[in-house]
């Protein structure tokens, strides 16, 4: 499922989702300068679908489940 995080907090929200036992995926790319690895989307990441997806809404850094 796609999840919208607070702006610029996709990595943090993804890590927090992992902490509650779910599997998240934050696509990463090299920055324009090539010196840093940054999220592909500033506000979005993905979580493996589970029946109790409502828990994701209550994780710090998550705005809403799309």
Image (cartoon, rainbow, N blue to C red):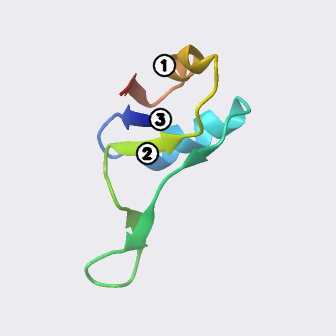
Q: Which mark is residue 57?
A: 1
* Relative to 39, residue 58 above or below: above
* Relative to 65, residue 52 above or below: above
Q: Residue at x 68, y 34 (%)?
A: 22
Q: Crowdedness of circle 2 by 10 Å Cα count: few (<14), some, many (20+)? A: many
- Per the model, the C-alpha gap separating discs 3 and 1 is 12 Å
Q: Residue at x 33, y 46 (%)?
A: 8
**Percent coordinates x, y for residue 6 in the rendering:** 34, 34
Going from N to C along the chain, the mark reached first, 1 or 2, is 2
| CB-based contact (under 8 Å), mark 3 and mark 2 | no
Q: Which mark is residue 45?
A: 2
Residue 52, image quadrant: top right
Secondary structure under badge 1? helix
Q: Crowdedness of circle 1 by 10 Å Cα count: few (<14), some, many (20+)? A: some
Q: Residue at x 70, y 29 (%)?
A: 20
- Per the model, the C-alpha gap separating discs 3 and 2 is 9 Å
**Percent coordinates x, y for residue 23 in the rendering:** 65, 42
**Percent coordinates x, y for residue 25 in the rendering:** 54, 51
Q: Which mark is residue 42?
A: none
Q: Residue at x 39, y 83 (%)?
A: 35
Secondary structure under badge 2? strand
Residue 64, image quadrant: top left
Q: Nearer the viewer, mark 3 or mark 1?
A: 3
Going from N to C along the chain, the mark reached first, 3 or 2, is 3
Secondary structure under badge 3? loop
Q: Is residue 53 left or right of residue 44?
A: right
Task: Please name the residue that numbered disc 3 is placed on.
Answer: 1
Q: Is residue 8 left or right of residue 21?
A: left
Residue 43, image quadrant: top left
- Per the model, the C-alpha gap separating discs 1 and 2 is 13 Å
Question: Which quadrant, please, contains the C terminus?
Answer: top left
């Amino acid at each position: 499922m796609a999840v919208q995080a607070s702006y610029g907090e996709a990595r943090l929200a993804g890590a927090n989702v992992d902490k509650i036992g779910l599997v998240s995926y934050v696509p990463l790319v090299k920055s324009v300068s090539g010196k840093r690895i940054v999220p592909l989307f500033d506000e979005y990441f993905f979580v493996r679908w589970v029946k109790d997806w409502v828990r994701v809404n209550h994780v710090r850094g998550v705005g809403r489940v799309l």
